[in-house]
Image: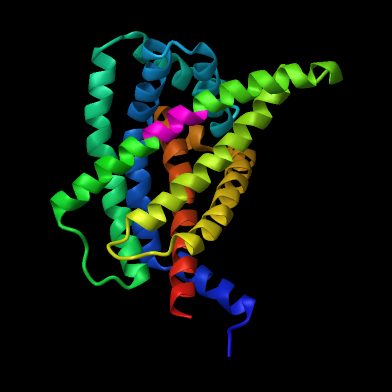
Amino acid sequence: MTDKPGSHAMQTIRYLLSLESHTYAFAIAANILLSFFPFMVLVLSLVQNVLHVRAAADMIYAALRDLLPEDPGLLDFVMRNLHVAVATRGRAEALSALTLIFSSNGVFVTMEVALNKLWGFKSNRSYWHNQAISLVLTFACGLLALLAALAAASGAGWLRGWLAAYLVLPETVTAIVVKLVSLLLSITIATIVYVVLPNGHVATRRTLGIAVYVGLALELAKAAYLLFWPHLGFRNIYGPFFVSVTLMMEGYVAALIVLAGGEIAARGRTE
């Protein structure tokens, strides 16, 4: 006898309300905050300073505007510092790569422990084995982000030409392409995380279906977060630290969604 859909939903909600899930999510969010700026500097440096594809860099900046709240102080702060860091050739890339190696490992270490417990795998990888896996995943995520930026730039250029006769604004085309590419990138990365990180065999076919829902949930959660952000009062409460808090809370919500997807996938394995 199978459980009712409402019972499945309640199990996931109970997991999300547990101390365990919040502990993992905050740890993941803290490391996302540490790796966010170095990751963006590294990808933008490769696009602008190595590949010299300005259209792809513009798509990355557009994706950042789609990710961050419509607050002049926050957007100006992030964009200005990114432009300065990317313009500093050589040194910025090296420092970003080193920082990214350290901070991204924290994301994947915590995620592996959480997924192993969800999937019932009794042992975690050794420290050095996990570091190696984390480095591979960091490289894969960076490569996927780079390819996504190039694909978005190419797709936006094609769509602008195709929709020119319908008087569709270029900004509208860019926004549509950014959201579609962002969704596909989220689904791909979620699938890789669910399949590669747990210390045991995970069926790709099942996790791919869950990853699609996770990607959609991430996009919906991002839209809701940006909508309610002005009412959260981060600027008044945290003063000059409101930028960091904004990014960390966004990472925290995203981590909870990814963990919820892992819980659903793991439960389906045992039913």
Instruction: Give the main secondary structure, helix, strand or loop, of the magenta stretch.
Output: helix
Viewer-proximal residue, 236 or 178?
178
Compared with residue 130, is residue 39 higher up or lower down, i.e. above or below? above
Quarter of image, res 181? top right
Near-viewer residue (27 or 199): 199
Q: Quadrant of residue 243?
A: top left
Colour pattern of the rendering:
rainbow
Q: Nearer the viewer, residue 69 or 106?
A: 106
Vertical placement of residue 47 versus 106, above or below: above
Q: Is residue 25 above or below residue 91?
A: below
Q: Position of residue 29 (x, y in %)?
A: 38, 46
Q: Is residue 232 visible?
A: no
Residue 41 showing in the rendered view: yes
Locate residue 266 relative to residue 184 in the image: left or right.
left
Q: Residue at x 22, y 63 (%)?
A: 124
What range is drawn magenta here? 142-148
User: x%, y% of residue 221?
Assistant: 58, 48
In the image, residue 239 above or below residue 8: above
Q: Quadrant of the N terminus?
A: bottom right
Does residue 232 appear left or right of residue 84 in this picture?
A: right
153 or 94: which is nearer to us?
Answer: 153
